[in-house]
Image (cartoon, helix red, strand yellow):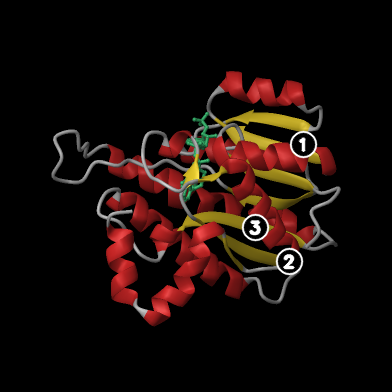
């Protein structure tokens, strides 16, 4: 699907991969609805691009997401591309002193439940469109092979991966495609101060856009592209590499 002159919704468009997607997509598309919490960052992007429309919303709140999706579909009924990009990662293990029981729900809600809410809430509008439409869910290599830290994060991304596959089956007789972008380590605020060999957010966004335009259902970005082969050749070696990821 060509990403030109479309109307898009991008969650988490104010930082990292989402911001890089906005900067690459805004100049060549019609309208972009951007959702995040920080009003200052939202305003800054909207000032930079006249076709970027900011929506302040917390994905941790079902009520907030329902209200915002109603507002967005009311103002932009022609949204044909939804990129579920926003996410958080909480790194302590369950044994660490700074492990916080209360973070479990938030991480699952923001990373897994909210993208599913958004797919459900945007679907009706997208089914009414006469042109091709797409959902893109951003996951991680950790959805396939988890690491030791961030167990809830790994579980949420594995859940989003499976949801994306099943949702794709459900929509196979419609004009809507469902894509999953499987990310490697990317240099963003999420990974600040940790990890080696990261790719830039700009390169990550470019690869996601290319994957959508090439109609790839599963878009393996950067080193994540090695996962399918290594998983066949030596799943135990790959598991050990990813464990310390
Ligand atoms: N960076 C990596 O190495 C990497 C690797 C694999 C997968 N990914 C995935 O790629 C996606 C983007 O990650 P990133 O590294 O670009 O992260 P990032 O720089 O930390 O940006 C996260 C974005 O999500 C928004 N967000 C966070 N919590 C939110 C909430 N409760 N409600 C609404 N918006 C919220 C943030 O805006 P506000 O804070 O203003 O809300 C921000 O715009 C995530 O799904 C992440 O899991 C990243």
Query: Could you tell which of marks 2 and 1 lies nearer the N-terminus?
Result: 1
Instruction: Give the labeled residue for mark 1.
Output: 75
Instruction: Give the residue number, with chain letter if any, for mark 3.
Output: 135
Which of pointers 3 and 2 indicates the residue nearer the eye? 2
The secondary element bearing badge 1 is classed as helix
User: Which is nearer the N-term, disc 3 or disc 2?
Assistant: 3
In percent of the image, x 53 and y 28: which residue is there?
37
Which of marks 3 and 1 precedes in the sequence?
1
**Between marks 1 and 3 in the image, the one whose residue lies nearer the viewer:** 3
Are the residues flagged by discs 2 and 1 in contact, CB closer than 8 Å? no
Q: Horizontal placement of 161 versus 242: left or right?
A: right
Relative height, residue 129 to residue 54 (above, below): below
Q: Residue at x 65, y 55 (%)?
A: 207
At a point 42% along the width and 39% down the height, the residue shown is: 191
Quadrant, the N terminus: bottom right
106 relative to 154, above or below: above
Pointer 3: residues within 10 angstroms few (<14), some, or many (20+)? many
Tell me how far mark 3 sits from mark 2, CA to CA. 14 Å
Q: Can residue 182 be seen in this view?
A: no
Q: Where is residue 5 in the image (x, y as percent from the top left)?
A: 86, 48
Q: Residue at x 39, y 58 (%)?
A: 142
User: Is label 1 within 8 A of ligand 1 (CB to nearest ligand atom)?
Assistant: no
- Badge 3 element: strand
| Residue on which disc 2 sits | 214
Q: In the image, residue 173 lies at what x, y percent? A: 71, 76
Dot 1 surroundings within 10 Å: few (below 14), some, or many (20 or more)? few
What separation in Å lies between label 1 and label 3 (alpha carbons)?
19 Å
User: Are discs 1 and 3 less than 8 Å apart at CB?
Assistant: no
């Amino acid at each position: 699907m060509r990403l030109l002159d479309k109307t898009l919704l991008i969650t988490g468009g104010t930082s990292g991969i989402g911001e890089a997607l906005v900067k690459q997509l805004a100049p060549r598309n019609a309208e972009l609805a951007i959702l995040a919490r920080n009003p200052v960052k939202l305003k800054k992007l909207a000032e930079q691009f006249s076709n970027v429309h900011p929506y302040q919303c917390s994905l941790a709140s079902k009520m907030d997401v329902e209200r915002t999706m109603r507002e967005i579909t009311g103002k932009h009924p022609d949204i044909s591309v939804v990129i579920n990009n926003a996410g958080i990662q909480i790194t302590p293990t369950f044994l660490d002193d700074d492990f916080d029981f209360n973070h479990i729900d938030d991480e699952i809600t923001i990373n897994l439940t909210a993208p599913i809410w958004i797919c459900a809430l945007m679907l009706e509008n997208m089914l009414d469109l006469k042109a091709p439409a797409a959902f893109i869910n951003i996951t991680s290599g950790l959805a396939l092979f988890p690491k030791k830290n961030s167990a809830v994060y790994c579980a949420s991304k594995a859940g989003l991966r499976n949801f994306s596959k099943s949702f794709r089956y459900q929509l196979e007789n419609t004009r809507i495609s469902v894509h999953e972008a499987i990310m490697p380590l990317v240099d963003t605020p999420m990974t600040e101060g940790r990890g080696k060999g990261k790719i830039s957010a700009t390169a990550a966004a470019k690869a996601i856009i290319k994957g959508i335009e090439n109609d790839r259902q599963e878009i393996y970005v950067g080193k994540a592209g090695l996962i399918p082969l290594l998983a066949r050749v030596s799943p135990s070696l790959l598991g050990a590499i990813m464990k310390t990821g």
